[in-house]
């Protein structure tokens, strides 16, 4: 995770500009800066503008060596030393000078804020993260609103192992009822903080926010791997997991396509098996290499199963409608959905659930929700899936589908 370094440099440059402007302003007042102080400071200003910062610092030190300096002269010296040292990469000298200037009590409110900002950035660059956070907090309390400083404050907490402050800072931004969406980087930091604290629940919650607002393959990979490792997660959900992997771009290996197609075939949904194999062939995961013939054999088997399904469909549908339970109606409905006849398919699944006598009622609701989302009815699908219960992974899979529907 990278800090906006360019913004940090820009901050230092801003303070340098303000210091120069302050010098020009005070130089116009004959009684503000004596010649023995003003002359080396003018030379330092010219040297720094030409990139000769080390020589400029020497001239500032020369001015600082003048005896009996006024408070105005001392303030001007410290401000110029801070800005020139920052430009020279001498963070320690820059921080001491700026803090001395602020502690003098003579810096106006308008000029104070960018100086506070520069100190915060300086401590961050020096990897003194607690001090960086302290000065960044002061920056915001005094009215600062630079978004890059918010990122720096968050990173200072994180890099300083202050995860409590990270959680507090991001609590409202990561919540569902806020108008401000946390950035991807902020949610990554939040997730990593929970990981450091070994807070699995908090970590998963942060990753769930990421898959909703910034859906990427790697976040889904993490969630899907974790859900399958939960105690009591049933192996019968393998096809459901594959469906999620397929929908989120996490089906990449040849064996993934082969196994998912076989599981769909075993579940009596050959149209889904066909869709999976077609995709595998499209992306060159199937039909190539030494195993190409094996892939083709499975494709032939799926084609044969499809032909038989279509040949017997009318008879199977009549028998399902006449059956005492709705199990076959759900299966036939799924085939219609994957065939592209969503309205008919969804209707049959709903009839099957309503008829009852199901082997696993919660599984049937999960199938309905998946089918609704596949058919493009995301809101309806999410509503169905939110009602799914179970401690064997059924509810967990349903929750992941709800997250996917919101992405």
Image (cartoon, helix red, strand yellow):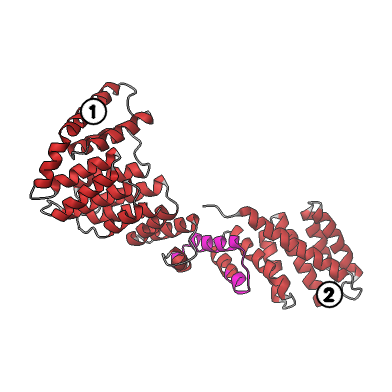
**Magenta-drawn stretch contains 406:** no
- In x, y percent, where is residue 362? 19, 55
Q: Which residues are magenta?
A: 137-164
Determine which residue is flagged by label 1: 303
Q: Residue furthest bottom?
A: 105
Q: Secondary structure at mark 1?
A: helix
Observer-nearest residue: 147 or 366? 366
Asked if residue 206 is positioned above or below residue 115 in the image, the reply reads above
- In x, y percent, where is residue 355? 13, 54
- In x, y percent, where is residue 49? 81, 55
**Is residue 288 shown left or right of residue 98?**
left
Q: Which mark is residue 69?
A: 2
Q: Residue furthest left?
A: 324
**Is residue 35 shown left or right of residue 340?**
right
Q: Residue at x 59, y 67 (%)?
A: 136
Q: How many marks?
A: 2
């Amino acid at each position: 995770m990278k800090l906006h370094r360019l913004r940090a440099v820009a901050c230092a440059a801003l303070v340098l500009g303000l210091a120069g402007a302050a010098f020009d302003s005070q130089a116009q007042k004959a009684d503000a800066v004596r010649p023995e102080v003003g002359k080396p400071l003018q030379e330092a200003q010219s040297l720094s503008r030409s990139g000769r910062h080390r020589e400029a610092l020497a001239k500032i030190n020369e001015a600082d060596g003048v005896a009996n300096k006024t408070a105005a002269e001392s303030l001007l010296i410290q401000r110029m030393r801070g800005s020139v040292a920052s430009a020279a990469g001498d963070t320690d000298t820059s921080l001491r000078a700026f803090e001395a200037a602020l502690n003098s009590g003579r810096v106006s409110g308008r000029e104070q804020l960018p100086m506070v900002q520069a100190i915060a950035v300086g401590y961050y660059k020096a990897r003194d993260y607690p001090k960086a956070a302290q000065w960044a907090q002061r920056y915001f309390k005094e009215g600062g609103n630079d978004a890059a400083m918010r990122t720096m404050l968050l990173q200072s907490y994180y890099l300083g192992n202050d995860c409590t402050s990270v959680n507090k800072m991001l609590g409202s931004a990561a919540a569902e009822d806020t108008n401000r969406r946390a950035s991807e980087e902020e949610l990554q930091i939040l997730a990593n903080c929970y990981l450091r604290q070994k807070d699995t629940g908090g970590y998963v919650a942060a990753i769930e926010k990421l898959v909703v607002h910034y859906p990427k393959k790697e976040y889904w990979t993490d969630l899907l791997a974790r859900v399958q490792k939960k105690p009591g997660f049933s192996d019968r959900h393998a096809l459901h997991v594959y469906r999620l992997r397929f929908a989120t771009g996490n089906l990449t290996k040849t064996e993934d396509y082969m196994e998912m197609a076989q599981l769909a075939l075993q579940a009596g949904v050959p149209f889904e098996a066909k869709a999976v194999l077609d995709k595998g062939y499209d992306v060159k995961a199937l039909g190539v290499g030494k195993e190409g013939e094996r892939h083709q054999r499975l494709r032939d088997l799926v084609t044969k199963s499809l032909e038989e399904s279509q040949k017997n469909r009318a008879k199977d549908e009549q028998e399902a409608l006449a059956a005492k339970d709705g199990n076959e109606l759900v299966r036939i409905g799924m085939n219609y959905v994957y065939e592209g006849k969503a309205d008919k398919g969804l209707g049959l699944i709903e009839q099957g659930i309503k008829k009852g006598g199901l082997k696993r009622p919660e599984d049937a609701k999960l199938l309905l929700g998946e089918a609704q989302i596949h058919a493009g009815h995301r809101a309806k699908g999410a509503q169905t899936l939110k009602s799914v219960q179970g401690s064997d992974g059924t509810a967990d899979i349903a929750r992941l589908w709800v997250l996917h529907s919101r992405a």
